[in-house]
Image (spheres, helix red, strand yellow):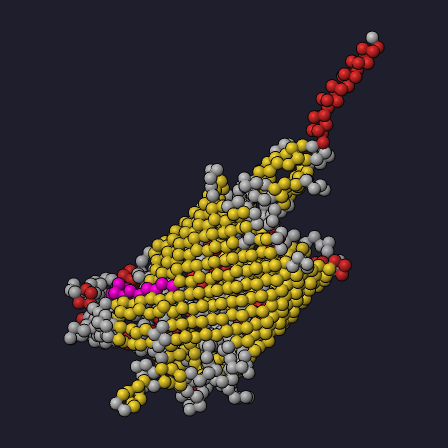
């Protein structure tokens, strides 16, 4: 019995042990699975799922799925992915799904700078960065419009309301007078040539699709720009385009469709006012020229304009460590003016494979576009403002295409008459085709034997080609005497080749609390522009004008180095030097050296502030540097150049006549224009950076100014020459503030504000040492009158006018009565005085975004204070003498005539210089993110209005006009848009 009991106990023990084996296995490990998605609920490929403090780990598959076994005693999983916040999750079930959120430091703290990147917290210079999430929304035709009003110290103004027009970009007001004031644009490491090309002269940046841009960094002070040396005096804008990711392939589509309408037109007499004025003041002959119609000529040349911008992209990875992004874009925008249109077809490829465990990274970028432009006849804008409103559009016969024109007794168009506005736009066909391709190949190799040392090489190639044609029929009144126009020009071809190579050494020395980042490199860039000869014809084949062929080239060779050093994350030093050699100067002046140095002190890392719960960041910055300028001056100004005198002077040899060669003015010892800059600033943050901002004060002194000045007769081959002369000083203050007053699960409110105050003064314009060259007339002209001046001791481009006198009783200006400012008893040019400047004293920008759950409301305001505009439209059409230039036609008058009663134009009266300070609401948008509406795609929609309103006391069409001279301005439209975005 005992033996049997023992056998039974043995059997039960064995069975119990066998049953406990799986239980023990379950106690030792657990299988966990799930899906990992991004913040848009899209599956993420390649997310690392690991068990903390073990070697156990897996990665997610193409569908974002994973399965992992938790070892005995472990109950946590760590999820990590490049660019996302790492998450550690406590496992409470067999299924764990995780949403990865973008890493805030990655998105906001890394800034692209010259030849590399740097954490924003480590910057010692004045650098601003705007990412795609903060770009201006709506129908955007050109990249610079994405950041208009977003950055302190940066002023961006569209040159007109035409979709083919470009923009004027100024960083800290510019540093030159006659050389270029445009900033250097660097696209994915390739510095672009400034200016334009045939068929797209003023809008070269429009050949780049704004939808492909990821971020834009603006380098403002000499410390950050000196790495670009000879081209950096006016600041640098670094554009970085979107790249592929390591997630699965995603397809995105976005379409923006818009309607553009007119806002304010030139303030002219209404039809009834015009008739009353003519009947009251006109001669019998003039009264007889009144018609019975009522024609709104603006309606005859302007229209409601449709626009569309469509972009599709595929981004992700095609294999392990092979991210790719491909995009296509189609943009088409009609202008308000009939015949005006811009069309762009663009493509972009970015391929970024890495090899040898990321020791070698390659980045191939290819961007191409074709722009088809139709140019409206902008002379019709003046004609529509001034054409007789009592005359019908059509004459009722076939002459001049059926349009009503002023004709003389012989039936020909009257010489000097204003042409029918409708005929000007309908009988004019000007178009162009511009192609551009920008390619760069980057290779970045981290040395296997010394991982802290990298070698980087960039090959860049920028090719552009532009051509076009103009046709006006022979019956059109505008070219009636020459039998119309019919000619083609181009193709002009521009090439820009770049080789960049540099070494970078970056190492943290923990034992001495130091970080060293050293860069040393070499650049070679070569430009070539060729323009074929062409002739302008009329419609019957007669040559009207011949243009000679051109072949222009220049090159730039550079050596540069930069040291970034930080100690204990508190004290920072940046030292930069660049040596440039350009073919634009003679060998004695060809090379220039441009150094800079900057210091930074992060006070919040000091012990006395380290535990401060209110102040989260405080960093002091100071920098000094020298930059140069050699753009905008031509390629051969130091050489004796002879120009073929086509259709000009001829010399007889025997029985033959030959066209001569004409010598051009030149200055043999041209050299760099240099700008010395100081910058003092600080960055701050409060309440864990819920409130952040920066303050900068800068000074700049430009010497050896490249300026065009008059010279004594007979001393050169021209009346004026471009030479190094004089100095310009400027200084300013910049303030930026960013705040998130509300941040909850349902509500987020972000506010961004910037302010700029700036002043510029001409210090010297003398060609003679110790001499004084004053009052050099500059700027656009109206009837050969200049309205602006350069004067030593004053701001550049101030208005140079007479001080208008007024009737004490009526307050009306007295015609021809001006103040005798020098008290010599005579009113002459000695009484002209400098009166205000087109440049604003203050520039403000304010953007705000309010999110409630899936709704988002955004607004962007912009303001200028202290800028003035010369109202040339009111002057040029606001006097009785302008009502009739001949005995066959009447012209409408500016409504200013009712206030002044001027009989003749008062060209230089300060009456027409008006305060053009303004407040604009540039953008208003309301959007809703539907999220994933099916398993196939997610959806977001928004409605936008651009150029919502403008508050100003300026009486003209728009207070923002190029050069501060308003003479028949193409109005900027108000744009209503609907945007739809789909992510698959």
Let me know if residue 614 is in the magenta part.
no
Q: Vertically, is 864 above or below 98? A: below
The count of marks equals: 0
Q: Quadrant of residue 872?
A: bottom left
Q: Is residue 751 above or below residue 785?
A: above
Does residue 631 appear left or right of residue 647 in this picture? right
Q: Residue at x 53, y 81 (%)?
A: 587
> At 61% across and 64% down in the image, what residue appears?
695
Residue 549 x %, y %: 36, 75
Can you name the residue that lies furthest to the right here? 2
Question: Front-most of 124 and 305?
Answer: 124
At x 70%, y 26%, the residue is 22
Magenta residues, start to end = 420-434
Q: Nearer the viewer, residue 686 or 533?
A: 533
Quadrant in the picture for residue 524: bottom right
Q: In what quadrant of the picture does the N terminus appear?
A: top right
Can you say whether 96 is above or below 640 in the image?
above
| 839 and 193: which is toward the camera | 193
Is 611 left or right of 780, judged from the image as shown?
right
- Whole-percent x and y of residue 664? 41, 84
Image-based side of 666 in relation to 356, left or right: left
Q: Relative to 588, does residue 682 appear above or below in the rendering? A: above
The residue that appears at 63% across and 40% down in the rendered structure is: 58
Residue 458 visible to the viewer? yes
Is 424 inside the magenta-drawn segment? yes
Residue furthest out toward the top: 1
The picture places residue 315, in percent across and down from the top left corner, at 50, 49
């Amino acid at each position: 019995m005992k033996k049997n009991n023992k056998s039974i106990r043995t059997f039960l023990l064995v069975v119990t042990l066998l049953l406990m084996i799986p239980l023990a296995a379950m106690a030792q490990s657990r299988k966990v699975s799930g899906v990992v998605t991004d913040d848009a609920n899209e599956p993420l490929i390649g997310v690392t799922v690991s068990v903390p403090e073990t070697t156990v780990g897996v990665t997610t598959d193409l569908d974002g799925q994973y399965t992992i076994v938790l070892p005995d005693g472990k109950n946590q999983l760590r999820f990590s992915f490049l660019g996302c916040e790492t998450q550690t999750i406590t496992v409470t079930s067999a299924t764990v799904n995780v949403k990865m959120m973008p890493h805030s430091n990655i998105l906001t703290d890394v800034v692209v700078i010259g030849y590399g990147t740097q954490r924003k917290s480590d910057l010692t210079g004045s650098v601003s960065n705007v990412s795609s999430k903060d770009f201006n929304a709506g129908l955007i035709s050109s990249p610079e419009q994405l950041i208009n009003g977003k950055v302190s110290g940066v002023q961006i103004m569209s040159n007109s309301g035409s979709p083919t027009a470009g923009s004027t970009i100024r960083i800290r007001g510019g540093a030159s007078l006659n050389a270029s004031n445009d900033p250097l644009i660097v696209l994915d490491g390739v510095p672009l040539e400034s200016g334009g090309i045939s068929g797209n002269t003023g809008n070269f940046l429009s050949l780049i699709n704004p939808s492909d841009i990821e971020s834009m960094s603006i380098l403002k002070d000499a410390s950050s720009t000196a790495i670009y040396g000879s081209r950096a005096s006016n600041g640098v804008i670094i554009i970085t385009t979107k790249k592929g990711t390591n997630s699965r392939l995603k397809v995105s589509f976005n379409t923006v469709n818009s309607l553009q309408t007119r806002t304010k037109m030139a303030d002219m007499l209404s039809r009834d006012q015009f008739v009353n004025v003519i009947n009251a003041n006109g001669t019998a002959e003039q009264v007889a020229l009144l018609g019975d119609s009522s024609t709104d000529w603006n309606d005859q040349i302007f229209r409601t304009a449709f626009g569309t911008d469509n972009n599709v992209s595929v981004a992700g990875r095609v294999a392990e460590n092979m991210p790719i992004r491909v995009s296509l874009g189609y943009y088409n925008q009609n202008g308000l003016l009939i015949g005006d249109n811009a069309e762009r077809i663009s493509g972009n490829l970015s391929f970024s494979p890495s090899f040898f465990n990321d020791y070698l990274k390659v980045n191939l970028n290819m961007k191409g576009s074709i722009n088809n432009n139709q140019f409206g006849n902008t002379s019709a804008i003046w004609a529509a403002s001034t054409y007789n409103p009592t005359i019908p559009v059509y004459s009722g016969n076939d002459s001049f295409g059926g349009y009503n024109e002023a004709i003389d007794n012989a039936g020909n168009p009257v010489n000097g008459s204003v042409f029918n506005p409708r005929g000007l736009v309908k009988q004019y066909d000007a178009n162009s085709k511009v192609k551009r391709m920008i390619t760069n190949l980057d290779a970045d190799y981290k040395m296997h034997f010394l991982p802290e040392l990298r070698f980087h090489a960039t090959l860049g190639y920028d090719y552009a080609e532009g051509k076009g044609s103009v046709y006006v029929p022979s019956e059109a009144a505008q070219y009636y005497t020459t039998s119309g126009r019919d000619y083609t020009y181009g193709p002009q071809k521009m090439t820009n080749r770049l080789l960049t190579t540099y070494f970078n050494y970056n190492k943290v020395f923990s034992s001495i609390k130091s970080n060293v980042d050293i860069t040393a490199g070499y650049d070679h860039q070569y430009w070539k522009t060729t323009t074929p000869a062409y002739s302008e014809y009329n419609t019957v084949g007669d040559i009207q004008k011949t243009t000679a062929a051109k072949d222009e080239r220049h090159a730039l060779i550079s050596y540069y180095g930069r040291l970034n050093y930080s100690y204990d994350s508190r004290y920072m030093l940046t030292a930069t030097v660049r040596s440039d050699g350009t073919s634009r100067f003679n060998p004695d002046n060809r090379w220039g050296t441009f150094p800079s140095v900057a210091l930074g002190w992060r006070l919040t890392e000091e012990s006395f502030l380290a535990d401060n719960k209110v102040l989260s960041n405080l960093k002091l910055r100071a920098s000094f540097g020298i930059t140069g300028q050699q753009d905008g001056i031509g390629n051969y100004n130091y050489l004796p150049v002879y120009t073929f005198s086509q259709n000009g002077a001829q010399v007889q040899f025997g029985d033959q006549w030959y066209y001569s060669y004409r010598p051009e003015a030149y200055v043999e010892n041209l050299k760099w224009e240099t700008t010395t800059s100081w910058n003092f600033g600080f960055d701050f943050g409060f309440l864990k950076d819920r409130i952040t901002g920066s303050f900068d004060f800068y000074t700049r002194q430009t010497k050896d100014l490249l300026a065009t000045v008059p010279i004594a007769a007979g001393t050169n081959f021209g009346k004026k020459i471009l030479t190094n002369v004089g100095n310009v000083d400027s200084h300013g203050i910049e303030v930026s503030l960013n705040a998130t007053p509300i941040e909850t699960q349902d509500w987020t409110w972000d506010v961004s504000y910037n302010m700029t105050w700036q002043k510029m003064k001409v210090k010297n314009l003398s060609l003679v040492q110790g001499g004084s060259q004053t009052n050099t007339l500059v700027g656009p002209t109206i009837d050969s009158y200049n309205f602006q001046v350069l004067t030593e001791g004053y701001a550049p481009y101030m208005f140079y006018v007479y001080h208008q006198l007024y009737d004490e009783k009526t307050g009306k200006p007295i015609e021809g009565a001006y103040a005798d400012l020098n008290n010599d008893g005579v009113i002459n040019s000695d009484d002209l005085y400098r009166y205000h400047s087109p440049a604003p004293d203050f520039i403000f920008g304010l953007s705000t975004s309010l999110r409630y759950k899936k709704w988002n409301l955004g607004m962007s305001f912009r303001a200028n204070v202290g800028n003035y505009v010369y109202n040339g439209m009111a002057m040029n059409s606001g006097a009785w003498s302008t009502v009739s230039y001949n005995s066959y036609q009447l012209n409408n008058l500016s409504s200013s005539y009712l206030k002044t009663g001027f009989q003749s134009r008062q060209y230089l009266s300060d009456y027409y210089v008006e305060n053009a300070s303004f407040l604009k609401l540039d953008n208003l948008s309301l959007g809703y993110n539907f999220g994933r509406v099916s398993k196939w795609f997610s959806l977001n929609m928004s409605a936008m209005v651009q150029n919502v309103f403008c508050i100003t006391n300026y009486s003209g069409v728009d207070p923002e006009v190029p050069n501060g001279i308003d003479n028949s301005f193409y109005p900027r439209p108000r744009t209503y848009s609907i945007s739809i975005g789909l992510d698959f």
